[in-house]
Image (cartoon, rainbow, N blue to C red):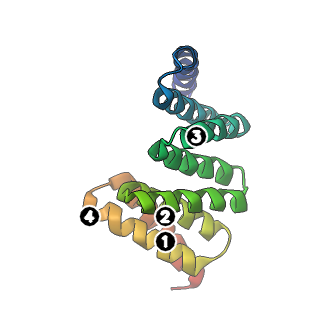
Amino acid sequence: LFSKIRKLAEAKIQLEKALEISRATADNKFQLVRTQLQLSSVYYAEGNTEQAKEIATKAIGLAEQNNIRNLATNGLIDLGHTLMARGEFNEASKYFKQALNFAKMDRARRTEARAKLGLGTVTYQQGNIDEATALLQEALDFYQPAGYRKETSIALTMLGRAHGAKGD
């Protein structure tokens, strides 16, 4: 645990330095957004979900302003996970749905599966088991044949919970 905390602290220091550099060179908005999203992930991993939400929200806004939709979409998914961890299921659902819409428009299948996995999980948390099952199955249908083991495991676990809740 100490090693993980130390690594997160080191990552945060490095990312904050990178953020300063990215802000100083205002011509590379992509790098600025990317660094903000990475820093948000570190705050999330530390358990500081409020700071993670604040930074991710800024990054998503900047990405949308600069038409960097792939980063905005992934940022929306990350923000959805942060909100879900805080128990803010309705808010999380909105972000996952927006990300899913963007991913479909961009035909970004992996990002679409990521949004479906998040949306399926939060939908399960909200008690809508049938909708959750459909979303989780769609995510699994992408991840399993593509060989994404971690995501496949998560989708299978959530599907198992959903089927158990239905009594299947």
Closest to the observer, 133 or 104: 104
How packed mark 1 is, by other alpha carbons closer than 10 Å (few <14, some 14-19, many 20 or more), is: many
Look at the numbered discs 2 and 1 and tell me whether their residues touch, using CB distance below 8 Å.
Answer: yes
Query: Which is in the foreground here, disc 3 or disc 1?
Result: 3
Asked if 68 appears above or below 140 in the picture, the reply is: above
Asked if 18 appears above or below 45 in the picture, the reply is: above
The answer to which of marks 3 and 1 sits earlier in the sequence is 3
Mark 4 → mark 2, Cα distance in angstroms: 16 Å
Q: Which mark is residue 79?
A: none
Question: Label 3, on which residue?
Answer: 65
Mark 2 → mark 1, Cα distance in angstroms: 5 Å
Residue 160: x and y, percent? Answer: 48, 72
Name the kind of residue labelled 3 in the image.
Gln
Question: Label 4, on which residue?
Answer: 145
Mark 3 → mark 4, Cα distance in angstroms: 35 Å
Closest to the observer, 11 or 4: 11
Question: Label 2, on which residue?
Answer: 116
The answer to which of marks 2 and 3 sits earlier in the sequence is 3
The answer to which of marks 2 and 1 sits earlier in the sequence is 2
Mark 3 → mark 1, Cα distance in angstroms: 30 Å
Query: Which is in the foreground here, disc 3 or disc 4?
Result: 3
The answer to which of marks 4 and 2 sits earlier in the sequence is 2
Q: Secondary structure at mark 2?
A: helix
Q: Which mark is residue 135?
A: 1
The residue sitting at 54% across, 51% down in the picture is 77
